[in-house]
Image (tube, helix red, strand yellow):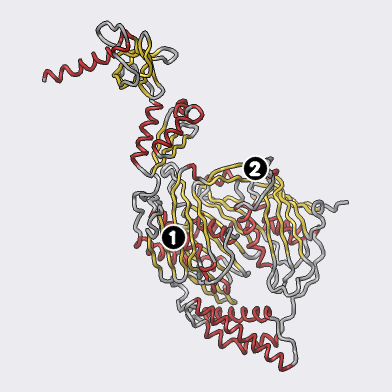
Amino acid sequence: MFNKVTKTFQYGQHQVTLETGEIARQASGAVVVSVEDTVILATVVARKEAKPGQDFFPLTVDYIEKTYAAGRIPGGFFKREGKPSEKETLTSRLIDRPIRPLFPEGYLNEVQVIVHVLSVNPEIDPDIPAMIGASAALSIAGIPFAGPVGAARVAYIDGQYVLNPTQTQLKSSQLDLVVAGTESAVLMVESEAEQLSEEVMLGAVVFGHEQSKAVIDAIHELVREGGKPEVQWTAPAKNEALISRVSQLAEGPLREAYQTKDKQARTEKLKTVSAQVNEALVAEAASNGTIAADAAEVGSILFDLEAKIVRSQILEGEPRIDGRDTRTVRPISIRTGVLPRTHGSALFTRGETQALVVATLGTARDEQKIDGLLGEYTDRFMLHYNMPPFATGETGRVGTPKRREIGHGRLAKRALLAALPAADEFSYSVRLVSEITESNGSSSMASVCGGCLALMDAGVPMKAHVAGIAMGLIKDGNKFAVLTDILGDEDHLGDMDFKVAGTADGITALQMDIKIQGITKEIMQVALEQAKEGRQHILGKMQEAVPAGRGELSDFAPRLITIKINPEKIRDVIGKGGAVIRALTEETGTQIDISDEGVVTIASVDAAAGQEAKRRIEELTASVEVGKVYEGTVLKLLDFGAIVQVLPGKDGLLHISQIANERVNAVADYLKEGQQVRVKVLETDDRGRLKLSMKAAQAEESADAAPQEAH
């Protein structure tokens, strides 16, 4: 019934098993990957033909986590999985990026990759198994795919690279890097680091790529035994006559358009060229009595022609699209304190790319609660990236963030994490929002720069300035050019784009996407060194504008006061049904959080209100000392004395014999309810009951006053 094929191989400290032929047999390709109790199912379905009029490659990748994989039932009313989490979106992108360039030009059949997480070991993140599974499923499906792809995670612990570390090992690592590639070439890198050098980062990429060849070998074996017959597909023949005619009509005007440095003006000229070429071809077809060329096909030819023009100009040493050489960073403008009522803000402009970044400080209550696959946890640092359509002078959809926005926000967050103060030094939760107001390349790196400046403007004690830069590469044969601070057009027309962020001391985030084979270690080395030069230039501009954080918080940010109380006293602060803490917050206008360990955090925009809340909590939790004199309040009169409160929630008996030195016949002759009296604590019994004395307090105060009167 089943034609099951299994391949097992050692991968770092883990054993990996690939299986096909038993589950999801109606898919074009299906592979189950198991890594020490983490199990994923990767499936691929490819349509037999492209849809009529299809002018782009419709590849979709969905990574889906099922809560049953961790032995949990989903929260919420419906008790089933809902919209994709941020982790699912980011992992979907991680799978997509290295496989997309491996489909041949002209292949426009719809391909859908779905990865389900079926079981999860808390120590083994499912993302690497998911990438391996997707690569294996594509490889056995028999469709045109220049894989397989191997994937690896690399840590850097005690000066050593560690392949596919456990989650526990990652906590002590200075690096979390994911690399994917074919047997001969690196295709994708995604990483976060603690200010590591270019040499260490490049070494990690090379190490991970070398080790991932074990995955590729295993997939080749799986394909030999369990792969489906190759689909007969040939790339559509190029219409050489049309290519030649479009080149004749468009090459001159396109070269002229690319002499225009302003993005919007250049875009309009390119649209005009496209319209004129299509009009000319329609007119020629009408006069010849033939069918006019498809506009999508003409658009594809124009794109190739644009790429040829721009790439050849750069490789021949001519100025780039906007007139720069390959190493120059666009002009930078920096302004902080842009928005008057926010906690921190910065406007960072680099050429035609601009980010308005706003920092907001909050308390532990404001931390993001994340219902992850392995349970709920919180995150004290949030970074949200938004790019509305007006940033590129276009109209479009506004609403929930797209995958690209989530990915860019995550990259910027990774870049800044290493420079944030530790939670025990700065106990605020922090939210950064990057509003991209203009975009012409590298908006995520503008978010890093603007984010660092906004945090400093908010008074966050950053460890160092952090800057980011986007780099590009154009390669033709043995000739190549590395481009610093790429434009949007250079990103589309180039062979590699990579983003590097870090401090003056080292790299904190590296993201790399390579579209071609043949990028050597030496080329990556040159690119990283040039990126370092650009990063140092931007850091210099940032340090000129904002030499250091402003040292104090915004007037509108909450002040946090932290005190430690005896955990046994927590109930005294909270009170019955929360009555005490509710009254405290309402009367002082503060926000109070108490941890199980007895750490009390008071948040208040008004410093005086925060101090008042602190004083009252200290009173509530203070222990009464025997022999000490207190200012007490008479709560109740009794025939034989009175009940006096010496501290909130702490009261004792003032016996009639301890009220005055003379005989007291009636308590009411000396005391009334609500009266303030000075009492000394004489003793406390085993049940915590206090014995008080006004006589002893008066005697002690008289004794203290006597020496002063003698002087």
Q: Which residue is mark 2?
A: 75
**Rendered view: 507 above or below 285:** above
- Residue at horizontal 47 percent and vertical 25 percent from the top: 568
- The three-letter amino acid code for the residue at tag 1 is Gly
Residue 26 spot, x, y in % from top left: 82, 57
Q: Is residue 629 left or right of residue 170?
A: left
Residue 617 appearing in the image: yes
Residue 335, quarter of picture: bottom left
Residue at mark 2 to residue at mark 1: CA–CA distance: 36 Å
Residue 36 in sight here: no
- The total number of labels drawn is 2
- The quarter of the picture where the C terminus appears is top left
Checking the image for residue 411, the label placed there is: none
Q: Nearer the viewer, residue 605 or 62?
A: 605
Could you tell me which secondary element the residue under label 2 belongs to? loop
* Vertical relation: 482 (above or below) 255: above
Left or right of 103 in this view: 27: right
Q: Left of 366 or right of it: where is 206?
A: right
Q: Residue at x 37, y 27 (%)?
A: 619
Mark 2 or 1, nearer chain start: 2
**Residue beneath disc 1:** 450
